[in-house]
Image (spheres, helix red, strand yellow):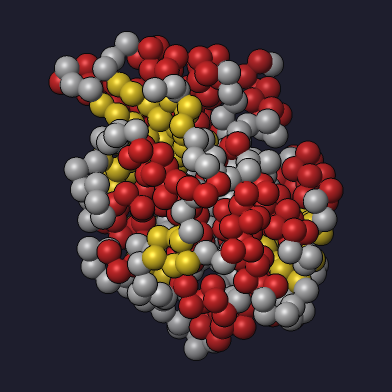
Amino acid sequence: MTNRIDLKQDEMPDHWYNILPDLPEQLPPPRDDTGRAIEVLKSVFPKRVLEHEFSAERNIKMPDDVRELYFQVGRPTPVIRAKRFENYFNAPIEIYMKMEGYTFAGSHKINSALAQAYYSKMEGVDLITTETGAGQWGIAVAMASSLNNLKAKIFMAGASYYQKTYRVTMMKMLGGDVNPSPSKLTRIGQELMKDEKNKDGSLGIAISEAVEYALEHNGRYNVGSVVNADILYKTIAGLEARKQLEINGIEPNYIIGVVGGGSNYSGLAFPFYKDYKNAKYIAAGSFEVPKMTKGEYKYDYPDTGKILPLVKMYSIGYDFIPPPIYAGGLRYHGVAPSLSLLMKDGIVQPRDYDQETVFRYAELYTRMEGYIPAPETAHALPIISEIAEIAKREHKKKIVLMSFSGHGLLDLGSYSSMYS
Ligand SMILES: *Cc1c(COP(=O)(O)O)cnc(C)c1O
């Protein structure tokens, strides 16, 4: 077998996988303390997306138009065996990377952006709105909006807007109307701006603004992580990976990845969960935003402006203002409710790693494999070192599947801090 496993276009799955019917217990429903939040959801989510959010159906058929768009942006993505990286550990271990950085949008986020933009267009509106932290989701939405003939209003966490100028340019070039958040464009933005601590913005603030803007301008809000429907659309990565490994008779012992809001990891891992009960599931986050290891499992707001319904999840608090770490995609304060439930039950184990450790692994990986991972993606690499130790101790081969969530070509500014 070669080190690269591809799928042909006609082998790409034609449905998404919904984990809700297979969870060990029922997902705690969203809670609406104001009596308005559920109404807000109904007005800003496309109907189909809202239906998928609460669906009890396991397999949900993908529209042909979305399938076609997946092909256009670079799906199916390959699984690459990281052989040189394996050799570095000098342990009986095989590492398979599901390469979501191979699409032009640069990360797994396009998988959901295309579906949500498509369902928004089906409602007959011409505007979608969204939030973005470091900008990867904004890029995916800008691209998806243009491919679906829609306008996109994007609220980007202020600090990132001024730091990640290449990402801003990419969004603009793709047709996105991107604004630093908090902004004067919404009432919530004006309100939150008054408090000095909010000046750099956060994903939580940008979400509130995007939702309010959609409400006021008859747009549809497209959500970048956390919710069931978003994870559903991102399972295309896990469904492909499962097929790619099964065709070659490879059974993973570990399924790993990183967690911002949780959709990247869930998108890879959920399609394995029901049938791969013996695999170990490990998800890593950032030590600087330790919602998984230090957060509490509780009802909390997904957004700082408290417009959306409360959901039960691991959270370090909706008003947490994250430090300006480089892995901007990992700064969110909560973890997707479905993934949180699996963590509470001990099925998915959390890890947190500090930036310095992660950057060391990112550099090592780049030199071994000739490919620069996004700083977010690189947070999962230290898990492999842990697995290698176990493999050595047990003298037993361990097979690892990792979600390689994105490339780091627009993160060179961050990585340059290692060489100054
Ligand atoms: C956004 C992002 C993540 C985190 O994804 P979530 O779905 O929010 O968990 C991980 N890696 C990359 C490259 C990203 O862009």
In the depicted structure, whether residue 392 falls above or below residue 358: above
- Which residue does the image show at 28% across and 15% down from the upper left? 91
Where is residue 349, by image quadrant?
top left
Q: Nearer the viewer, residue 387 or 184?
A: 387
Q: Position of residue 7 (x, y in %)?
A: 49, 40
Q: Nearer the viewer, residue 289 or 387?
A: 387
Q: Of all residues shown, which one is farthest toward the bottom?
A: 35
Q: Nearer the viewer, residue 354 or 28?
A: 28
Q: Nearer the viewer, residue 49 or 186?
A: 49
Q: Does residue 331 appear left or right of residue 388 in this picture? A: right
- Which residue does the image show at 53% across and 24% down from the upper left? 362
Q: Position of residue 88 (x, y in %)?
A: 40, 12
Give the quarter of the figure containing the N terminus. Answer: top left
Q: Position of residue 147 (x, y in %)?
A: 75, 58
Q: Does residue 141 appear left or right of residue 59 in this picture? A: right
Q: Position of residue 201 (x, y in %)?
A: 67, 55
In the depicted structure, whether residue 77 falls above or below residue 389: below
In the depicted structure, whether residue 396 falls above or below residue 330: above
Q: Of all residues shown, which one is farthest toward the left?
A: 394
Give the quarter of the figure containing the C terminus. Answer: top right
The tally of labels here is: 0
Where is residue 150, by image quadrant?
bottom right
- Which residue does the image show at 58% across and 23% down from the upper left? 371
Visible residue check, residue 372: yes
Visible residue check, residue 213: no
- Which residue does the image show at 84% across and 48% down from the upper left? 173
